[in-house]
Amino acid sequence: MAEVTGNTVYNCRNCRNPIALREDLISKKYKGRSGPAYLFSHAMNVIVGQKGDKQLMTGLYSVADIYCSNCGEVLGWKYVRAYEASQQFKEGKFIIEIAKIAKLY
């Protein structure tokens, strides 16, 4: 588990494992499977599952579920590939559902 000091950190709500830094938050205007979600440029202490193609609200993507490396909770997904040129800025970024994280200052 990574040790993070001096930054606002988003943690796994289930086990408090650090997942993402506030400085890596790109947008709060996304939707996950269970409701609102955030888009992050980076995530830590996650396991990236197998990728597969999925039709989402903004187009077709290759995505992979991400899991907490400590407790295995599904946190969201990683955009592996965007098939539409206008959505390629999402490639390599992470959707993390708000319901799955807690903020620590």
Image (cartoon, rainbow, N blue to C red):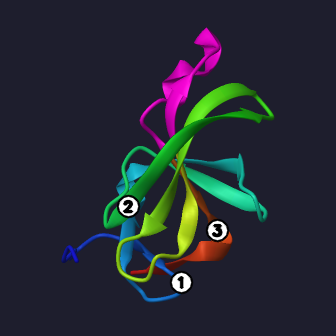
Residue 2 lies in the magenta stretch:
no
Span colored in magenta: 79-93
Asked whether the residues under the numbered discs 1 and 3 touch, taking CB atoms below 8 Å apart as contact, a structural biologist would say no
* Screen quadrant of the C terminus: bottom left
55 or 57: nearer the viewer: 55
Q: Secondary structure at mark 1?
A: loop
Tell me which amino acid carries mark 1.
Arg
Q: Is residue 20 above or below residue 86?
A: below
Q: How many residues crowd mark 1 within 10 Å: few (<14), some (14–19), many (20+)? A: some
Residue, disc 2: 47
Q: Is residue 9 above or below residue 83?
A: below
Distance CA(mark 2)–CA(mark 1) = 16 Å
Residue 14 in picture, x, y percent from top left: 52, 87
Residue, disc 3: 98
Tell me which amino acid carries mark 3.
Ile
* Side (left or right) of 19 relative to 5: right
- Residue appearing at x 58%, y 37% in the figure: 52
Residue 51 in picture, x, y percent from top left: 51, 40
